[in-house]
Image (cartoon, rainbow, N blue to C red):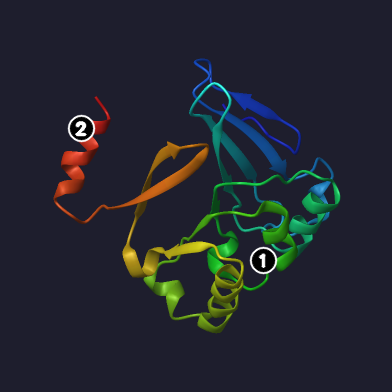
Amino acid sequence: MWNNVYSGDIIDSPSKLYSISILNPPLDAHHWSTNNSSIVMQISIPVSKHDSVSLLMTGDIERTAEYRMIENFLLTNIDLLKVSHHGSATSTTQAFLSATKPKDAVVSRGKWYASRNELSLNKVTKRLSVNGINHYITVDSGAILFESDFNNGNPKWNKIEWRNPSFAQWLFANNR
């Protein structure tokens, strides 16, 4: 069964392991492009009684959706950003980065897409670098898994090389 979700919806896990806030699309997005109508989710994972780790999954949104979320005060500081639209320069604007202040970012981009819009990606990675945001690009490193180690209220992301044979050892050791 499919359920539609819209900005303002909140999905809590029954065990309180996470909470998902839907930030996009708005209910009246029927006139928007498919990209701007992408679901944007802020996932909060409690790591202690008073602290949580925050991930922002942005789909393929572009400036229009970013600015609407900024204007409606829907964005907060986050720890990890999934960069919109495969690193296209039509998204991940300076205003969006200023509103979210991510510490780390991932650009999900395959080999086919890598040969297209490289100039566009360079603009986005420059914005990330200028803002002091660590960033990872999947076309360069393959799948990227993050393990959070919450130290003194600041999440520290450990990039785990999934191609490394020790990944299987890590996976089994940490998921029992």
Task: Residue 71: give x, y in percent of width and height.
Answer: 85, 52
Residue type, label 1? Ser
Inter-mark Cα distance, 2 to 1: 38 Å
Mark 1 surroundings: few (<14), some (14-19) or many (≥20) residues within 10 A: many
Residue depicted at x 65% and y 51%: 38
Q: Residue 173, located in which quarter of the rendered image?
A: top left
Dividing the image into 4 quarters, which one contains the N terminus? top right
CB under 8 Å between discs 2 and 1:
no
Q: Residue 61, located in which quarter of the rendered image?
A: bottom right
Task: Residue 106: give x, y in percent of width and height.
Answer: 48, 58
- Is 150 rendered above or below residue 48? below
Task: Residue 137: give x, y in percent of width and height.
Answer: 42, 66
Q: What residue is pinned by disc 2? A: 173
Say whether residue 146 is left or right of residue 70. Answer: left
Q: Secondary structure at mark 2?
A: helix
Mark 2 surroundings: few (<14), some (14-19) or many (≥20) residues within 10 A: few
Instruction: Tell me how many marks there are.
Output: 2
Q: What residue is pinned by disc 1? A: 91
Residue type, label 2? Ala
- Is 170 rendered above or below residue 31? above
Tell which residue pokes out farthest to the bottom in this image. 119
